[in-house]
Image (tube, rainbow, N blue to C red):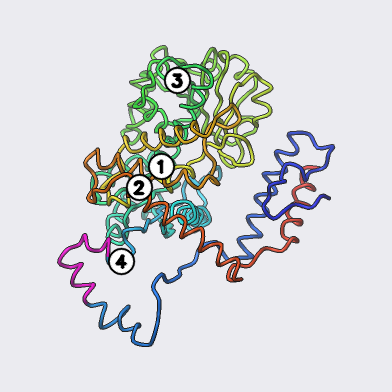
Amino acid sequence: MKEISLDLKNLNDVFPENFSQEQIAKGKTLFLKKLAEDSHRFYGGKIQTAPKAGVFGFNWFNVWYTPGVSKISTTIRDNNDASFELSNRGNLVGVVSDSTRVLGDGNVTPPGGLGVMEGKAFLMKYLGGVDATALCVDSRNEKGENDPQKIIDFVKMCQHSFGAINLEDISQPNCYKVLDTLREECDIPVWHDDAQGTACVTLAGLINALKLAGKKIGDVKIAMLGAGASNTTIARIIIAAGGDPKKMVLVDSKGGLHTGREDIKADPRFYRKWELCQATNPNRVNSIAEACKDADVLIALSKPGPDTVKPEWISSMADKSIVFTCANPVPEIYPYAAKEAGAFIVATGRGDFPNQVNNSLGFPGILKGALMVRARKVTDEMAIAAAKSLADYAEARGINPENIVPTMDEAAVFPTEAADVAMQAIKDGVARNIITRDEAFEWAQRDIEYSRNMAKSLIDDGYIDVPGKDILQNALKWAIDQVS
């Protein structure tokens, strides 16, 4: 068995030479899952709390706590906005979930979401220079049903401790009511990353993919498989960015969304889906196979694959077709199979394939931008500004069919995105703190460099242990055995 490197850069080359592309793809998925389990057990999770102020002598305890801290309490009492400067609130996000729709695993119980929510906190700190806390809550009522009002009440009660709230992995239709209510009733940004974040990065990828294909967003026919929080918001954001709703078809598990869907119309909880029923699919297309015929774009966020999207659907699409299959942890069709079926550009949600269209490119920079100007909300215009920022950044350094969006290791993309979002917040009139774009960029860049340098120092100084090679090799051996 070949040895895998600690940086995992040789992940595609460590499987046996006689493995097919499908075996390698499955093997990588299994390896990453097994390595995640063993590494999380090794570290006991991936986030900790550490002070950012110093203790230079005994009496500094009296500064950071009583009696000195009394002055902080009374100052904030008299001006609540002072909490953004005198506490960590101005750079702190609460990651809130009831864990009812986690990745492709569905309802994993409230504590089952901790791995993902800690992961969001990890990425916010490392990529965006933002502190975050995982808050997995039980939204069940006395009947055992998940009640969106419980999440709404929880966020409204705890909002005073945070500069922003990141909603995550809340099942539909509850997610619509939770987001729309909190956006209006909270005095800080409330952002649903599965919906708005995924929409932002998908739009960024679509902008550049269309440039490479020589097509315009208002002209293309778009088929969308899945009509959950992600795809319904993607559709709404694409329309806001210039897409033609009459040329869009969304298909859920019961068929196409259109004005004949009485099941959606009859349930007021699905008001966002009904809005799309009224705006899209005037010909009442009812199947994804039919929707894909001559379509320029397929965007799938549905059941994890790899057999959810059929090669023949892609083969029936228009010339230079664009295929985004972004289910996690396994795309609806593997990129190699989509390419064999005729796709011009293929994107997934995973970083071990080309063109990772994943919300991790969005939320660290977007929330940093919102926090810096102390925004009261994240508007749709701010999300579109972030998408254009990501697309422009990638285009400036060069794009091609295998590289349409930035990657997470391009550090400069995040302060650029944060600055563009901050400026849009000011333009939209939702910012408390007015700064220039240069100030925003320098602020974000400084905080991101601080976070990355701190993480490096903790490793260099031995406070973060390096996993032994046995953890990597054992995970690889297990994955190879499973697919052999």
Q: Within 10 angstroms of label 4, few (less than 14), some, or many (20 or more) residues? A: some
Residue identified by numbered label 2: 369
**Residue 176: x and y, percent?**
35, 39
- Write the residue at 22% across / 72% down: 73
Give percent across and percent down for residue 463: 58, 71
Identify residue type, mark 4.
Answer: Ser
Q: Amino acid at mark 2?
A: Gly
Circle on res. 249: 3
Q: Position of residue 177 (x, y in %)?
A: 32, 41
Q: Which mark is residue 417?
A: 1
Q: Earlier in the sequence, mark 1 or mark 4?
A: 4
Confirm or deny contact between disc 1 and disc 3 (CB under 8 A): no
Mark closer to the chain start, 4 or 2? 4
CA separation in Å, label 1 and label 4: 25 Å
User: Could you give the CA–CA distance between mark 4 and mark 2, rounded to whole angstroms?
Assistant: 18 Å
Structural distance between the alpha carbons of marks 3 and 2: 33 Å
Q: Spatial distance from mark 2 to mark 1, Cα to Cα?
A: 8 Å
> Residue 210: image x %, image y %?
49, 22
Marks 3/4: CA distance? 47 Å
Q: Where does the magenta region start and end?
A: 71-85
Number of callouts: 4
Query: Dot 1, how many residues are within 10 Å of its Cα: few (below 14), some (14-19), or many (20+)?
Result: many
Q: Mark 3 belongs to which amino acid? A: Val
Instruction: Categorize mark 2 by other alpha carbons within 10 Å: few (<14), some (14-19), many (20+).
Output: many
Q: Nearer the viewer, residue 164 or 34?
A: 164
Give SS at disc 1: helix
Is most of the magenta stretch helix, strand or loop?
helix
**Where, by quadrant of the figure, is residue 475 drawn?**
bottom right
Residue wearing tag 4: 87
Residue at image point 41% right, 69% down: 52
Q: Residue at x 34, y 46 (%)?
A: 438
SS type, badge 2: helix
